[in-house]
Image (cartoon, helix red, strand yellow):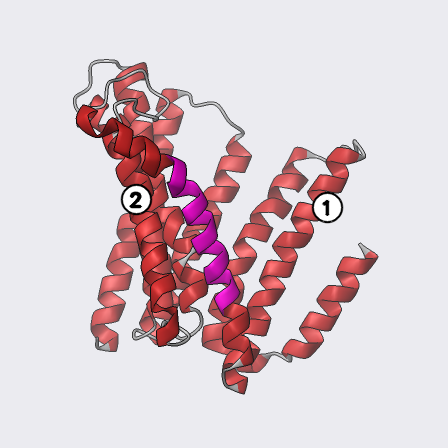
């Protein structure tokens, strides 16, 4: 794809994402949805920045699948967010708006379409947008099957798991036993595929060029940051140390954002940094904290 076409396509999708996020946010106000507005704004910003990083990668490295994966995944998440809020509007706020049941149906499984690829294909394809080698094709197909199976099970399950008291408009009663088995196996299979995809980063590191090693090291800084936050959060809860909600939300948002940011820097501008120094300082900071 030419840089001009990539720029128009990525920019156009980003504009659509912004529009859908705005509509969904307006509906949350109309619905009077519960939740901390600051927390919602922070994590909404995380997804928008992630999409923006995807746009930058897609424009400057249009052949790299990682950028398009970030854009598409965030787009799917934003669509699920907007549809979920419309379902609340149609079924709870106004109660007579059209397509409420269909919106509730989609909101039950639409989130997986966005989050699934982020947790599987993103680490599997980083940093060049390709598998580490042909031997990883079965892992890719296994991840694809698990990501596809989960929303299909929810979509056709007679007991719609959407949070709304509404019947599934496409319930497949005859397949309920099969759907039950797939549902029981789906989440463990997805977790296994996600772990295998993350493991591919370490395998790629051992057998790749020095350039990709530097890129992977930078992403490990992002993983270390979010892992450190999880550990810190656990210590705070165990020790019953109260911290302001705004501070906890801000650090949590920064932790989740560290992964796409580190990937964007690694792909676009990794030469500007001494990765070894960054890693050593991150480790020292983590120990002192």
Mark found first going from the N terminus, 1 or 2: 2
| Residue 9: x %, y % from top left | 23, 63
Which quarter shows the N terminus?
bottom left
Give the image quarter of residue 131. bottom left
Q: Which mark is residue 149?
A: 2
Please report the residue visible at 54 percent of the width from the left and 82 percent of the height from the top. 271
| Residue 206: x %, y % from top left | 55, 79
| In the image, residue 81 lies in the stretch drawn in magenta | no
Q: Which of 83 and 190 is in front in this view?
A: 190
Does residue 55 appear anywhere in the picture? Answer: no
Q: Which mark is residue 189?
A: none
| Residue 277: x %, y % from top left | 71, 76
Helix, strand or loop at disc 2? helix
Tell me where the magenta segment starts and ends, as one range: 184-200
Q: Nearer the viewer, residue 171 or 288?
A: 171
Q: Which mark is residue 232?
A: 1
Does residue 37 appear anywhere in the picture? Answer: yes
CB under 8 Å between discs 1 and 2: no
Give the image quarter of residue 30. top left
Callout 2: few (<14), some (14-19), or many (20+) C-alpha neighbours within 10 Å?
Answer: many
* 197 vs 149: above or below: below
* 167 vs 249: above or below: above
The answer to whether 98 appears left or right of 223 in the picture is left
The answer to whether 38 appears left or right of 230 in the picture is left
Please report the residue visible at 59 percent of the width from the left and 59 percent of the height from the top. 223
The answer to whether 134 appears left or right of 256 in the picture is left
| Residue 153: x %, y % from top left | 29, 36
The answer to whether 283 appears left or right of 186 in the picture is right
Helix, strand or loop at disc 1? helix
Please report the residue visible at 54 percent of the width from the left and 76 percent of the height from the top. 205
Q: Distance between the residues labelled 1 and 2?
A: 34 Å
């Amino acid at each position: 794809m030419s840089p001009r076409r990539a720029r128009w396509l990525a920019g156009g999708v980003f504009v659509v994402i912004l529009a859908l996020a705005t509509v969904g946010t307006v509906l949350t106000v109309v619905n009077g949805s519960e939740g901390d507005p600051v927390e919602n704004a922070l994590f909404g910003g995380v997804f928008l920045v992630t999409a923006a990083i995807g746009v930058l990668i897609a424009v400057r490295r249009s052949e790299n699948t990682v950028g398009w994966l970030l854009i598409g995944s965030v787009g799917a998440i934003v669509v699920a967010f907007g549809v979920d809020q419309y379902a609340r509007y149609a079924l709870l706020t106004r109660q007579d708006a059209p397509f409420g049941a269909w919106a509730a149906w989609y909101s039950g499984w639409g989130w997986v379409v966005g989050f699934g690829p982020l947790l599987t294909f993103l680490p599997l394809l980083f940093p060049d947008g390709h598998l580490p080698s042909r031997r990883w094709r079965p892992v890719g197909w296994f991840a694809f099957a698990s990501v596809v199976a989960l929303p299909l099970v929810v979509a056709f399950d007679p007991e719609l798991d959407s949070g709304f008291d509404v019947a599934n408009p496409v319930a497949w009663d005859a397949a309920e036993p099969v759907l039950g088995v797939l549902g029981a196996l789906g989440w463990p299979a997805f977790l296994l595929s996600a772990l295998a995809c993350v493991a591919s980063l370490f395998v790629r590191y051992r057998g790749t060029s020095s350039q990709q090693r530097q890129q992977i090291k930078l992403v490990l800084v992002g993983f270390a940051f979010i892992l450190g936050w999880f550990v810190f959060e656990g210590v705070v809860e165990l020790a019953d140390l109260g911290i302001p909600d705004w501070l906890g939300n801000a650090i949590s948002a920064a932790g989740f954002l560290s992964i796409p940011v580190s990937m964007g820097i690694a792909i676009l501008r990794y030469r500007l940094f001494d990765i070894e120094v960054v890693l050593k300082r991150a480790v020292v900071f983590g120990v002192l904290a």
